[in-house]
Amino acid sequence: MSGILSVCHLGATPYREGLALQEALVRRRAAARNGGAQATDWLLYPDHPPVLTMGRGGSGESLRVSRESLAARGIEWFEVARGGDLTWHGPGQLVGYPIVDLDPRGRDLHRYLRELEEVLILALERWGVPARRVPGRTGVWAGEEKIASLGIAVRHWVGYHGFALNLAPDLGFFELIHPCGLRGIRMTSVAARLGACAPTLDRARHEVAGLLARRLGYDGIRWATAEEVRNLAASIETSTAVHTNAHHAA
Amino acid sequence: MPISIVVPQLGESITEGTVSKWLKQAGDRVRKDEPLVEIQTDKINVELPSPAEGTLEAITVPEGTTVPVGTEIGVLVGTAADDAAAPAPAGAPAAAPPHPEVEGDSARQGNLSPAVRRLMREYNVAMPEIAAIRGTGLAGRVSRDDLLEYLKGRATPPAATPAGAPSPVPALAAPVPALAAPTAPAAVLPGLAPAGPFASSGPREELIPFNRVRRLIAENMVRAKHTAAHTHCFDETDMSAVVALRREWAAKLEAQGVHLTYMPFFIKAAVLALREFPWVNGEVRGEVMVVKRYYNIGIAVGRADKGLIVPNLKDCDRKGLVQLAGEVNDLAARARAERLRPDEIAGGTFSITNAGVYGALNSAPVINLPEVAILGVHKIAERPVARGGQVVVRPMMNVAIGFDHRVVDGELAVKFLRRVCELLERPELLWFYA
């Protein structure tokens, strides 16, 4: 495995836009495999406003408040085609969307998931938060509490969606849901563990990107501007709009 | 030519996938590489693109079903020029390219689609019969239509295999020819001749996806076992007095429309003992122990295939035996009818489980987190016991307590359990002290 990993801090990104950016880059990555344009794998860091997203593993019973009351709380709601149940994203969380061609990686999805977990565990340990896996429960745990969630989607053997590491979010938002559909689990954050010693989001973005590039075997990292990503996605959108209308409606 | 849509290999450690969403309906036209179906495994959702342009002819595995990797979940009919004759009527041999490696019967059997296997179960079709059908599917495989055609011609379904005859061995799931040996144990025991659905030729294994309830039960049980330092101890109680009381009062209460079981007595005894030993009526919340001065008693209700649920009765210390009797029956009936309110399955402080209704003489129950203890009651059985140097026969019952040894010491648990036994042996104490 080689090549460059393009990384971008997107800044403020509504969830819907983040989804569209991912889908555009996934299409570009898959097309590149068939001899199309040059394309790299990506790691996108969006800053989402508070949003609840429901994956394909969810049942609708993980929400502890009414759907109607979410708007009043300023929380958006999305149902998305990723694995996993209900989760929350919002300020203070490090959300990362690796867009990775899994074809040359042997299409082993569990191995990919475990690698992502490993990246987060290594980062947390570097900051002084002992972290671990819990067999059968994808995600990263600090003691008995969950500190990072994962949910992956795969299209044309390109992985997207990704991880959400609780750096310093308002953990009160998790009271609204049964995170990941698990009853009685408690969420924690790096800030809850370390207080003022917690790394900043910016430092976390750099360190997680570095570890991810190392674990997934990239030669190096290239930081792209948010503008570049948005322009790139827009150009893909227009060139493929006709082709994709059908399944967006589905 | 029909193309099988199968769950692909998704990773070394992945053996099965759940069909999470069909993005196309049967009959829909699809382009090559257009997303067709989503498969979920663990926290991964995979979109399968269509392998060719054509029409999705059939969805053989519905959403929400978990199947092993390699299982056919749908059939696509291509529309490329060389497939012009594809929608041929059933029975016409399709021009399938011969795959030498799948010509053997065993390979064909292993490739049967879930739809075919279901029909085989329904109509009790044995493997040798399938082998005799000329398949029109991919590589000569027997399709659903082939089987329906065959069933039309089959005069009498061999529903009951005559004893002594070669009994169809359910070897579908493991297509090993040697397993189809014509001597099944059933033939040796005519009294146990295959009759039920399990004896017929179905697959030897069935994948039943966890529904929400089963998943929650599984998670709660594992969490309880991993969190609480489960310890158990056991005692026995002489139920003579309670049996006599119930015998006397059951008929009178029945006339008032209240069916009196033993459970209200168990609840009364437990509540009084809990008041005496408050730590047993507690909860571990982080680093603190919460002692509760209200008594919401959970009752484990078994529900055949729907799975266990533990609704609780609120404030049992403020209710009389007759009121408890009515509420227990109501709660159990509504639990079985799935008519419980959400607050009835939350907020319990202590639970009682009665494995005796199924005949158990003893059990080691799992704590219903976040509670710290659970009382197990069992079958009341007459047995000889020593009383004052004499052997007498008494209705005896074993009782068990499962407790979280992190916060409930053995001494406390034993004393609590003994007090429950005393209160059941001398119900007048309920009257004096409750």
Image (cartoon, coloured by chain):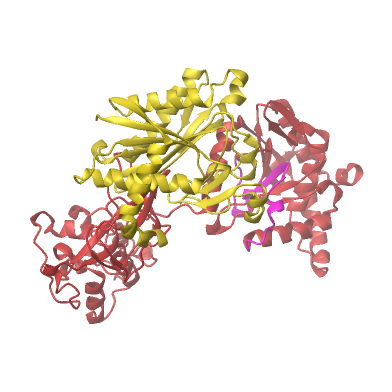
Chain colours: A yellow, B red
- Residue B293 or residue B382, whichever sits in front: B293
**Residue A1 position in % (x across, y down):** 24, 30
Q: Quadrant of residue B138?
A: bottom left
Q: Which residues are magenta?
A: B337-363
Would you say residue B329 is visible in this rendering?
A: yes
Residue A36 is covered by the magenta coloring = no
- Residue A187 or residue B49, whichever sits in front: B49
Say left or right for A99 vs B244.
Answer: left
**Residue A37 position in % (x across, y down):** 23, 43
Say left or right for B317 vs B140.
Answer: right
Which image quadrant: the C terminus of chain B? top right
Which image quadrant: the N terminus of chain B? bottom left
Residue furthest to the right in view is B432
Would you say residue B172 is visible in this rendering?
A: no
- Which residue is at 56% across, 54% downward? A60
Residue B348 is covered by the magenta coloring = yes
**Residue A98 position in % (x across, y down):** 38, 37
**Residue A58 position in % (x across, y down):** 50, 51
Q: Is residue B420 above or below residue B144?
A: above
- Which residue is at 13% across, 69% downward? B81
- Residue B113 or residue B397, whichever sits in front: B113
Q: Quadrant of residue B195?
A: bottom left
Q: Is residue A6 above or below residue B124?
A: above
